[in-house]
Amino acid sequence: MRFSNSVVLRYKSLELSPIRFRDKRTYQEVRSFNKEWLTPWDATMPPEGLSQNRMIDPAFDSASAAAFTSFYFAAKKGLRDKSSVTLAIRVRGKFVGIISASNMVYGSARATQVGYWIDQRHSRKGLTTLAVALLTDYLFQERLMHRVEVVIRPENEPSLKIVAKLGFREEGMRPNYLHINGQWRDHRVFALHQEEFGTGLVNRLLNK
């Protein structure tokens, strides 16, 4: 495992690194192929979020060139102003998904929330679990976060297994917390604090 100033995290064939503009075609292919797989978990814009100043097409295509471009520049801005860390998940150099730490708060809170998605063709191989472990280690060790949180819909069994493997502590339910796939959805809340981090999640995972 290696940390660097450019936020490139590696463990064996798995790499987490900033999304590149040349990822555009592969990103679009992966999103298009996984539309049915990802739609139930994708964040959407509620009607209250639409205004004359910010019109968002309800039929917004997450696999479109416009979607990638918007995502790419938002990811770059987040890294630059330290408000988020959005990284491509790569296996042997091939783009297979995204993992991010968003809503990063510093000061007296020092907290962030981790989210992710992966190509169905690479799911159930332990890659997402390892990616979450790598990013969480970085957040605690390099960004000096005190709290890392993951929120998961109760129906999302694969994600529930990930936080269980990594030892995240469940804190309860947030009713109607996020607008997902067209509706406000309940989410279960899982978290780790710096005091619970120990020698790191990658070590925790490998020693199981």
Image: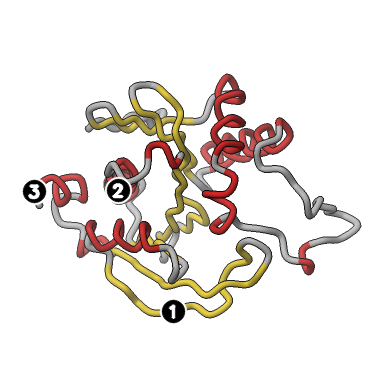
| Residue 108 x/y as whole percent | 41, 65
The quadrant of the picture occupied by the N terminus is top left
Q: Earlier in the sequence, mark 3 or mark 2?
A: 2
Callouts 2 and 1 close, C-beta under 8 Å: no
| Residue 87 x/y as whole percent | 46, 37
Secondary element at image label 2: helix
Mark identifier at residue 173: 1
| Mark count | 3
Disc 3 packing (10 Å; few <14; some 14–19; many ≥20): few
Callouts 3 and 2 close, C-beta under 8 Å: no
Please tell me which residue lies in front, 102 or 68. 68
Residue that label 3 marks: 207
Q: Looking at the picture, which amino acid does disc 1 mark? A: Met
Secondary element at image label 3: loop
| Residue 174 x/y as whole percent | 49, 77
Q: Looking at the picture, which amino acid does disc 2 mark? A: Thr
Q: Is residue 13 visible?
A: yes
Q: Looking at the picture, which amino acid does disc 3 mark? A: Asn
Q: CA distance from mark 2 to mark 1?
A: 22 Å
Residue that label 2 marks: 129
Q: Earlier in the sequence, mark 2 or mark 1?
A: 2
Q: Earlier in the sequence, mark 3 or mark 1?
A: 1
Secondary element at image label 1: strand
| x 27%, y 44%: residue | 126
Q: Is residue 90 above or below residue 129?
A: above
| x 52%, y 30%: residue | 19
Please tell me which residue lies in front, 208 or 18. 208
Query: Would you identify the image quadrant in which residue 163 lies?
Result: bottom left
